[in-house]
Amino acid sequence: MPTGLAWEEKTMWHDTGLYFGPKDVSYWIEPIVSPENVDCKRRIKNLLDAAGLTEQLISLKVEPASDTDLLAVHSKNHLQYIKDTSSSGGGNVAKQFGTTRVGENGFEIAALAAGAAISCVKAVMSGAVNNAYALIRPPGHHADAEQSMGFCVFNNAAIAASFALKDHELERVAFVDWDVHHGNGTQSIFWNDDRVLTISIHQDNCFPPDSGSLSEVGGKKALGSCLNIPLPPGSNESVYLTAFERVILPALRKFKPDFIFVPCGFDAGFHDPLGRMMLRSESFRKLTKMIKEIAEELCEGRLVMTHEGGYSPHSVPFHALAVFEELSGIDTNIIDPYGNTGNCEVSKLLRHEEDAISAAENLLSYVTEG
Ligand SMILES: [Zn+2]
């Protein structure tokens, strides 16, 4: 069964501007592009093309998400705010924690990104593909119902999941968010929805501040529908694989989703400027293999990944190539030239890493039984 690729060139035109951080020249910051710029994403697509992999994937038709699709997750106020900012020339749309910029016509581009995620769901549900990846900008997992945050305008994965629940009458869906930052927006959107299990494995207290702790287990109406695995900075492949084996896979087996979404960031890679983790391309390949196999075991392989963070233009394309190879079962024989750089090799867990996983493992009893 093939893998679908949702790629729409216009989402690469998302304009995050020449200023990241304070704009006032008194801060002495020479203007520079935002970390969330087109480079990493376009270089992924270029490598897939150069490797001959794109032509072996199913290219999915992308249409913009409708207002109805967006309003399934976001408030009317938020939607109108993005439309207004976009039509008046663009600007910062984040209310807290730094800048999230949309350019002029940024609404149309953000709606295309969400639409790409929906097109992945449609393709998987129709049986046209086994699994699919939305390679899009802007990312989505920090955006909640009411606000944009952390480079995210609309929550693409949450919009796609809502579409799957409503239009395909699925009963239960799960998220496994391995972006290095907490998937706070997705967690918030489904906080009181017991049809949705949100799992986030991330660097402890990285972004947003004070978000993604073990104590966040879901709202009163859906206790156990949220599971956070905050890991210490410096965690390598061994820590992630152990967390998958001891926490994430058992949680999914307990919840029994009909569909799995992976908000897929590559900022847990060892080169990343916005994270402090130690994953390499082979690590992302192994995580993808585990998720693909559990999707086959639990929900006929139904799996969609939405592109989130990942800010090293050197390494991210190779991390993504490994994920695409694993999703599609196609080996390009391209070796990541950075693969053996850094202290990324598999090793025995350190005491504080073991403690972090044990603490998350103790929360398995909370997870809703499917
Ligand atoms: Zn991130």
Image (spheres, grey):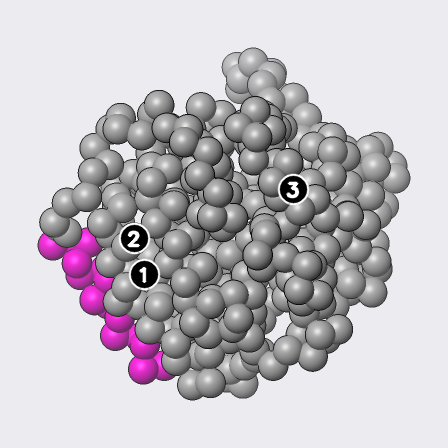
* Residue 326 versus residue 67 in the image, above or below: above
| Residue drawn at point x = 25 percent, y = 74 percent | 362
Give the magenta range: 351-366
| Residue drawn at point x = 63 percent, y = 50 percent | 4
Q: Is residue 359 magenta?
A: yes
Q: Secondary structure at mark 1?
A: helix
Horizontal side of residue 157 vs 363, given as left or right: right
Q: Which residue is mark 3?
A: 136
Q: Nearer the viewer, residue 38 or 224?
A: 38
| Residue drawn at point x = 70 percent, y = 32 percent | 12
The quarter of the rendered structure image containing the N terminus is bottom right
Residue 303 occupies quadrant = bottom right
| Residue drawn at point x = 41 percent, y = 63 percent | 293
Q: Nearer the viewer, residue 298 or 145?
A: 298
* Residue 336 versus residue 59 in the image, above or below: above
Q: Is residue 300 magenta?
A: no
Q: Which residue is mark 1?
A: 244
Q: Which residue is mark 2?
A: 240
Across the whole image, how many numbered discs are drawn on residues?
3
Q: Alpha carbon of mark 2 to alpha carbon of mark 3: how far?
A: 25 Å
Give the x, y percent position of residue 159.
68, 61
Horizontal side of residue 361 vs 122, given as left or right: left
Q: Are marks 2 and 1 in contact (CB under 8 Å)?
A: yes
Q: Nearer the viewer, residue 225 or 126?
A: 126
